[in-house]
Amino acid sequence: MITYYDDRSVQVTSTAIRIEGRAYPLAEVGMLWHRRGSRSWRVLAGRGAIGVALAGPLVAAVLGIGLAVWLGRSPTVTIAVVGASVLVGLAVGPVADFLFEFLDRSYARGSRQLEMWARWRGRPVLLLRTGDALRFGQIYRAAQRALENRPAAPPGSAPAGRSGTGASARGERPGTGR
């Protein structure tokens, strides 16, 4: 038995796809496709908040320098205000690395719900729904490989089908045009 993917709730092997305690033997799975849901505004708002958090100290530094020049105070006060503004701007460096890590992870997870469907025993079945794009891609590709590498059907039996690519690439259910 070959294991294509394995975590605590999903296991894809050369014999079956097991998701959250339910097993779907590969011999009974006819076709595989996926659908993408609508964008999550919560994720997009979170990305925007990270952008604002990155830009905030830089804007404050520029405003501080502008204020120091506009006030026209003594050179000592101007240098103190410009120095403080530059320090605020430099504070972005360590914070930016931390925030960019969150931003990078948000893109890896994705901003949509993703669904993996299969034709099992002749009817469509939702196997998996997740918002984690990275994990979904790994599971979906493992399921595709398992279906592509399963043993051929015995002579005289109807073919079980193959991994669908056309409908899944368009986010449609096969045969429905939707």
Image: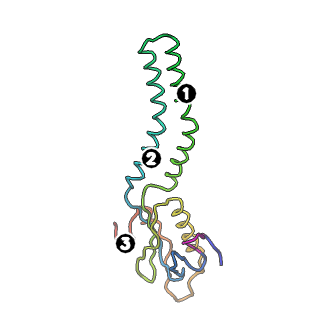
Measure the C-alpha gap from mark 3 to mark 2.
37 Å
**The quadrant where residue 49 appears:** top left
Q: Residue at x 43, y 48 (%)?
A: 46
- Given contact means CB atoms under 8 Å apart, are the residues at marks 1 and 3 in contact? no
Circle 1 or circle 3, nearest the eye:
1
Q: Residue at x 53, y 62 (%)?
A: 137
**2 or 1: tag closer to the N-terminus:** 2
Give amino acid for label 3: Gly
Spot occupied by residue 172 in the image (x, y as percentages of width and height)? 38, 66
Circle 3 or circle 2, nearest the eye:
2
Give left or right: position of 37 versus 101. left
Is the magenta region chiefly helix, strand or loop?
strand
Q: Is residue 178 above or below residue 92?
A: below
**1 or 3: tag closer to the N-terminus:** 1
Q: Quadrant of the C terminus?
A: bottom left
Measure the C-alpha gap from mark 1 to mark 3.
62 Å
- Residue 95 colored in magenta in the image: no
Task: Please tell me how crowded label 1 is: few (under 14), some (14-19), or many (20+) other residues with Cα within 10 Å.
Answer: few
Q: Name the residue that disc number 3 marks.
A: 175
- Given contact means CB atoms under 8 Å apart, are the residues at marks 2 and 1 in contact? no
Is disc 3 placed on a helix, strand or loop? loop
Q: Name the residue that disc number 2 marks.
A: 47
Give amino acid for label 2: Arg
**The quadrant where residue 166 appears:** bottom left
Magenta stretch? 5-12
